[in-house]
Amino acid sequence: MAKQFPKIEATHRSFIERQHIFFVGSAAQGTRVNVSPKGLDAFRLIDDHAAVYLDHTGSGNETAAHLAADGRLTIMFCAFDGPPLILRLYGRGRILPRGGAEYRDLLETLFGDVEPVGARQMVRIDFDLVQTSCGFGVPLYDYEGERPSLPRWAASKGEEGIVAYRREKNSVSMDGLPTFLVEADEAAAG
């Protein structure tokens, strides 16, 4: 039932653009595997072999640590309505630090130059394999909207509070790997 493709095709692009949630999977040698759900209209395709998502400050920063140590990244989309389908992007990822040239360019070209409060970094994936599968086992769900909790929490902290939170909670992974986020924040600040 699974089919593999070397790049994104038009039907894949259309499917991805309709999704409200995606999942990010990463790991490094000797670490736990991390799988994170993402929403907030954060995902964009760059071309047929690359994509990026705008990453918001959260309780951990496992993906950044895993990418620094290993680089492997998988992104998965599931159809929760309409015809069943699962689509995975397999490739290598890297962090684009907030304030960096590539971050600023992609923010302008793909996100309308709108940086949400609490934006932490962007995660770029250069993928060499697109795999689809049936999705017959994925249940049907109705999309009701985005939760306002994360943007509201970030706004209540303010920029200084967010930076302090990231320093405390996002500088190392749960397995002790560095995320290099603090260094990136310091470089962006000046």
Image (cartoon, rainbow, N blue to C red):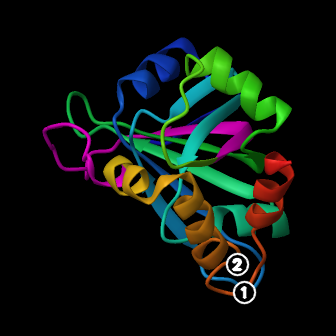
The answer, for residue 70, to whether it is visible in the render is no
x, y percent for residue 82 = 21, 28
Q: Quadrant of residue 130?
A: top right
> Which stretch is magenta?
121-150
Identity, as a three-letter code, of the amino acid under mark 1? Gly
**Real-space Cα separation, disc 2 to disc 1, in angstroms:** 5 Å
The answer, for residue 80, to whether it is visible in the render is yes
Which structural element holds mark 1?
A: loop
Quarter of the figure that contains the N terminus: top left
Q: Which mark is residue 176?
A: 1
Horizontal relation, residue 145 to residue 25: left or right: left
Q: Which mark is residue 31?
A: none
Report crowding for label 2: few under 14, some 14 to 19, many 20 or more residues within 10 A (C-alpha): many
Q: Please tell me whether residue 132 belongs to the stretch shown in magenta.
A: yes
Horizontal relation, residue 97 to residue 161: left or right: right
Label 2: which residue?
Answer: 172
Q: Please tell me whether residue 174 belongs to the stretch shown in magenta.
A: no
Q: Quadrant of residue 50?
A: top right
